[in-house]
Amino acid sequence: MSDDVYRLISPSGTESELPVYSGTTGPDVIDIARLYKEQGVFTYDPGFVATGSCESDITFIDGEKGILMYRGYPVEQLAANSNFIEVSYLLLHGDLPTAAQLEKFDHTIRTHTMLNEGMLNFFKGFRYDAHPMAMLSAVVGSMSAYYHGEMDASNPDHRDIFAHRILAKLPTIAAAAYKLNIGQPFMYPRNDLGYTENLLQMLFSVPAEPYEIDAVAAEALDLLFILHADHEQNCSTSTVRMAGSSGANPYSAIAAGISALWGPAHGGANEAVLTMLEEIGDTSQIGKYVNKAKDKSDPFRLMGFGHRVYKNFDPRATIIREMCHRVLEKLHREDTPLFDLARELEQVALKDDYFIEKNLYPNVDFYSGIIYRALGIPTSMFTVMFALGRSVGWAAHWREMISDPAGKIARPRQLYKGPATRDYKPIEER
């Protein structure tokens, strides 16, 4: 039931009463479903910046106040007290698990990380220099050919199996893509390791020698995955929902989401940060490039500053900033000058009146790219790492969408600006 109505009177005098709904928190929404039938018009909202596309219980963002909550829990509390597997359970099931529930869930994820050997052979069909995101999307899409036995979307158990498989197997797929790129043998997952520890050993270990997992590296990845786990109706999540709304196989929907994430305006932002730092090159050039960023006629932009949703500050950036500094202090890499440059640029931007007035604070992408680089993860894998964290959010949204009794296939409308009706002319008369 609506809480109120919004009365709309057209220029011709036709009146419509549009229901107004209030959520738990955040702005009210106006139900415009009857607008075309009663008024003969569509709404127009390029980029869906003011459109509520669905009803959801998963994530809430208040960009003005810098708030991000998963299932009502502030992300700051989850980052300080939880881990990625527990947060994944929360996103998928709605509540934090008991000790027994968490143990069972963790066991399920640990013991389903293996890939069918046929899927590993699939990697041999890619060029050695294929982009890891291209491989990730293709191999995830192929999962529908291997795991079609439990794909009744109306069956809650099957929806659970799908979510568990995506969460468990995506790190194995990601690591296999990386190993193909660098010409090393695939490393199988180990059930005795935690989620991020297992990922690190699949990425960086080799059969010829033992590999010691760095605790700080594992902790940093776990924190990044928590912060990337979900972000409301962003481009890739909306893509998963839209593709899934047709009843398509959910693995195909996740593959579509991965492809959407690959875009430089979405998941590729942290990669752009490193490209920018390399262009600046040296701390002595920071002033020059900051001035270029302020010049509206100059195409140069400081990547990793500001956010489309967060108009105050990105709460995730506040959390990850401390971890970024810990990683840089612990892991001494050859890229030290680049990291020094990032630190100096951060300080300049935080103190500059121009950036303060426009709320252009460093966002999560600024710090995540630096952390990945410090961990030895190549730039081509940055968006893949983003996908690993976001996978549970995609799965949660697909489950929510597919189990909604009021759900229907997504079908936006448009403002048509093409030619009016015209008659076909034979080719000799054109």
Image (tube, rainbow, N blue to C red):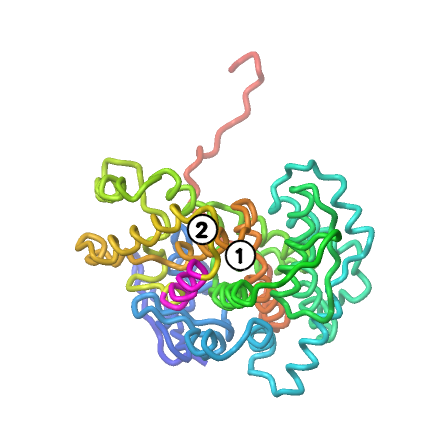
Report whether 136 appears left or right of 20.
Answer: right
Against 92, residue 32 (above or below) is above
Q: Which amino acid does label 2 sit on?
A: Asn
Residue at 41% over, 57% down: 367
Q: Which mark is residue 148?
A: none
Nearest the eye: 23 or 200: 200
Q: What residue is drawn where x is 76% and y is 61%? A: 114
Residue 137 on image: x %, y %:
64, 49
- Residue 206, how many percent across, how many down? 71, 52
Q: What residue sits right under mark 2 in the picture? A: 270
Task: Estimate how packed mark 1 is, as few (under 14), some (14 to 19) or many (20 or more) residues with alpha carbons within 10 Å.
Answer: many
- Residue drawn at x 72%, y 54% is 209
Q: In which quarter of the image is residue 61?
A: bottom left
Classify mark 2: helix, strand or loop: helix
Q: What residue does disc 1 label?
A: 386
Q: Residue at position x 38%, y 57% from top?
A: 49
What residue range appears in magenta? Answer: 318-329
Residue 20 seen by the camera = yes
Horizontal side of 387 relative to 277 (left or right) equals: right
Q: Earlier in the sequence, mark 2 or mark 1?
A: 2
Residue at the top extreme, as displayed: 428
Indicate whether residue 133 is drawn in magenta.
no
Q: How far apart are marks 2 and 1 (CA)?
A: 9 Å
Mark 2 and 1 residues: CB-CB less than 8 Å, in contact? yes
Q: Which amino acid does label 1 sit on?
A: Phe
- The answer to whether one can see residue 229 in this image is no
Regarding mark 1 in the picture, which secondary structure is present there?
Answer: helix
